[in-house]
Amino acid sequence: MALNVEKFDVGVENQLGLIRSATESNADEAIEALKAGKVIAVPTDTLYGFACNACSSKAVNRIYDIKGRKHTSPLAICVEDVSDIEHFAVTDHLPHGLLNSLLPGPVTIVLGRGESSILEKSLNPGLDSIGVRVPDSDFIRIIAHGSGSALALTSANLSGQPSSVSIKDFENLWEHCAYVYEGGVLPAGRAGSTVVDLTKPGKYRILRPGSAKEETVAILENYSLLEKC
């Protein structure tokens, strides 16, 4: 049975090892949980998400189980910094400076994985592309850095249900997480990140409008990219 927040004060929740504040002082325990192959819930710059080590097939499968999500639905990854992306995806076809103009921010960039990607083949098997996030959110970037790996990241909700802007929204799933990190009510709404396909040189395609479509398109076209029909 999921823990009911209304039945416990904050002190008891912390004693049970479930709810923590999303602050740097709590980053080490989050990093250790990720290294141990566990799933945690974290705030981002858009929604609350489930995160785990992207190179742990056991942890990735755990996220699919928690969400009740089909394994044919791919997961995105989160890295600490734009400079990390080239280790996981193909970026050499992109105009210089483009990724730094888009990220950190509420955008998921879909890129080719390429032969040199260090991602585990078990993550999104059969797909030659990967969605990459660098959220404008200190806590998740700190733990991504400390984990020494990319994080698999997806919204903290049951598949097909509304996304979560507070930890209360996914209270029924708390029990499946090693920790739930509290970052308050997120102001971006439930639209999630804007997802843009940049796998083709000189082209872009918006796969999901999300919360930053207009700003994203303006940046892409400023770099002379054309919308792919």
Image (tube, helix red, strand yellow):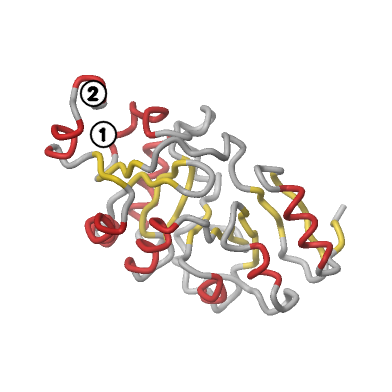
Image quadrant where residue 140 sits: bottom left
Q: Are the residues tagged 2 and 1 within 8 Å (C-beta)? A: yes
Task: Say few, some or many: other residues with alpha carbon within 10 Å of mark 2 (under 14 / 14 to 19 / 20 or more).
Answer: few
Q: Which mark, residue 175?
A: 1
Mark 2 / mark 1, whichever is N-terminal: 2
> Percent x, y for residue 9?
18, 27
Query: Which amino acid type is marked by label 2?
Result: Met
Query: Which residue is pictured at 58% across the width and 70% down the height?
Result: 89
- Number of marks: 2
What residue is pinned by disc 2? 1
Relative to residue 92, is residue 112 depicted above or below? above
> Percent x, y for residue 57?
37, 57
> CA–CA distance between discs 2 and 1?
7 Å
Image quadrant where residue 114 sits: bottom right
Query: Which residue is pictured at 72% across the width and 65% down the height?
Result: 199
> Percent x, y for residue 178?
24, 45
Query: Which residue is pictured at 63% across the width and 70% down the height?
Result: 100
Relative to residue 179, is residue 165 depicted above or below? above
Which of 175/42 is in front? Answer: 42
